[in-house]
Image: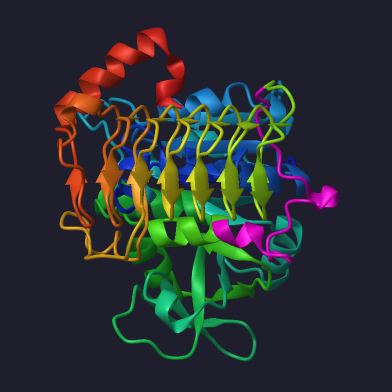
């Protein structure tokens, strides 16, 4: 199976609903669970399933993804035959450069699918958190001799509007597929995981993208195929979460703190592999008070951490207080600072007695009302929060914001401090010369 299946991971879409967390970072490269990146889950699934020929179709902000993947060694993908390749769009004779859609991303990389002995192409999404053995899925597909099989799962009625709604008959055949339905009825959610017959995929991609200029894998390939030929659904019953919006990302992280989490990161029979960071052991001082939290190697805890996820290299000084929050690598929380219901990106400095996300829930965010409305506050990477400063709930502070760029009176709940895109790029390009970690 390892030699006759090619894997393509879609990792090129914009990540607008994760706001400042993906300003200079690919969505699939966002940290998860303290020490992982989201892309680690799909790569680990592939390796444990015996799939070693993998192409990652990247486009927007790929630097962090490239830095994390490297040669693929942590996943045993630094191989002479097979391995992992990051496939970015390239200039063609016709003048095209960027991927014009998910199907076009595959079309521009048809050569990667391989030679005649490749039987199937497994198309995966890089921004999902789950553990899945793909081998039963592939065998199910082969047994039905279908040009396409879709993986589906059950989600809540509220969430199904974010995905494709799939109805199947008693034989597992798909009878209806509606992308992001406005009205909800009983059915399954498409996981965005597809397995194609390789020859059929080559043929239909050439036709739809090369001749008809139709570039979306769902609307231009999957749905028409359901109407034209037999497509089957494979029902997946395990944990699966798409972290494409801020609330889903936050809740999926916080769920790891449950006494019996649905996503078991301590299952050593199916380990989630990632790049090692070579940090020293976690250090907890006598002044510390820690409860129900995940704290990674390299962190130094002198203050209070409650129901939070703390990445490596974070320093929480004596008298500081963090609750219901996620703090990324190498951030510093000074003495007396208080952080509640917040996501603090890497390399952030929080000054003495500053407060982030405290108080009542407050109004929805003025700039991002659909995503910052549950009380979460975002602090972008490299931001500097000065001593005694106060930031309310449903707030967003952009990456690279310095203390002198913040309003002197503090940031009220529902407000944002954002920099122009040109300034973000300028500061990012300057800092990458000195500290590559800013783009990670």
Q: Residue at x 64, y 87 (%)?
A: 171
Q: Which corner quadrant of the image does residue 279 belong to? A: top right
State the residue in front, 253 or 425.
253
Residue 100 forms part of the magenta stretch: no
Whether residue 249 is visible to the viewer of this picture, yes or no, is yes
Q: Is residue 388 above or below residue 433?
A: below
Q: Which corner quadrant of the image does residue 259 belong to? A: bottom right
Image coords of residue 210 (percent x, y): 30, 46
Image coords of residue 33 (percent x, y): 60, 47
Q: Could you tell whether 187 is left or right of 119 in the image?
A: left
Q: Residue at x 36, y 35 (%)?
A: 59
Q: Is residue 263 above or below residue 86?
A: below
Task: Provide the major secondary structure of the magenta segment.
Answer: loop
Q: Residue at x 22, y 62 (%)?
A: 369
Which residues make up the magenta segment? 254-277
Image coords of residue 380 (percent x, y): 34, 37
Q: Is residue 372 above or below residue 385?
A: below
State the residue in front, 155 or 125.
155
């Amino acid at each position: 199976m390892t030699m006759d299946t090619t894997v393509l991971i879609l990792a090129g879409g914009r990540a607008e609903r994760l706001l400042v967390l993906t300003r200079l970072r690919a969505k699939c490269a966002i940290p998860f669970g303290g020490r992982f990146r989201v892309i680690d889950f799909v790569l680990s699934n592939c390796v444990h399933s015996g799939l070693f020929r993998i192409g990652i179709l990247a486009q927007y902000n790929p630097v962090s993804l490239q830095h994390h993947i490297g040669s693929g060694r942590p996943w045993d993908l630094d191989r002479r035959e097979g391995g992992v390749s990051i496939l970015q769009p390239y200039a063609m004779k016709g003048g095209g450069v960027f991927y014009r859609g998910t199907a076009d991303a595959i079309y521009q990389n048809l050569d990667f699918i391989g030679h005649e002995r490749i039987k199937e192409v497994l198309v995966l999404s890089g921004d999902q958190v789950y553990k899945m053995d793909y081998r039963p899925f592939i065998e199910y597909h082969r047994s039905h001799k279908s040009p396409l099989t879709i993986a589906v799962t059950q989600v809540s009625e509220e969430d199904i509007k974010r995905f494709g709604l799939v109805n199947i008959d008693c034989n597992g055949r798909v009878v209806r597929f509606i992308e992001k339905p406005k009205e909800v009825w009983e059915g399954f959610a498409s996981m965005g995981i597809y397995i194609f017959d390789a020859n059929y995929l080559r043929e239909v991609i050439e036709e739809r993208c090369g001749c008809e200029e139709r570039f979306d894998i769902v609307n231009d390939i999957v749905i028409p195929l359901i109407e034209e030929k037999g497509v089957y659904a494979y029902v997946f019953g395990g944990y699966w979460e798409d972290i494409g919006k801020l609330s889903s990302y936050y809740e999926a992280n916080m769920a790891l703190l449950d006494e019996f989490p649905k996503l078991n990161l301590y299952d050593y029979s199916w380990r989630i592999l990632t790049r090692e960071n070579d940090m020293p052991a976690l250090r907890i001082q006598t002044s510390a008070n820690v409860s129900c939290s995940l704290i990674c190697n390299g962190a130094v805890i002198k203050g209070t951490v409650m129901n939070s996820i703390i990445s490596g290299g974070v320093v929480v000084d004596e008298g500081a207080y963090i609750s219901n929050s996620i703090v990324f690598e190498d951030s510093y929380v000074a003495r007396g600072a208080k952080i509640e219901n917040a996501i603090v990106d890497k390399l952030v400095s929080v000054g003495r007695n500053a407060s982030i996300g405290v108080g009542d829930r407050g109004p929805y965010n003025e700039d991002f009302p659909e995503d910052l409305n549950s009380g979460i506050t975002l602090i972008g990477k490299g931001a500097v929060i000065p001593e005694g400063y106060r930031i309310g709930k449903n707030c967003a502070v952009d990456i690279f914001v310095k203390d002198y760029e913040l309003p002197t009176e503090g940031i009220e709940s529902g407000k944002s401090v954002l920099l122009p895109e040109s300034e973000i790029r300028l500061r990012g390009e300057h800092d990458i010369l000195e500290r590559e970690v800013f783009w990670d």
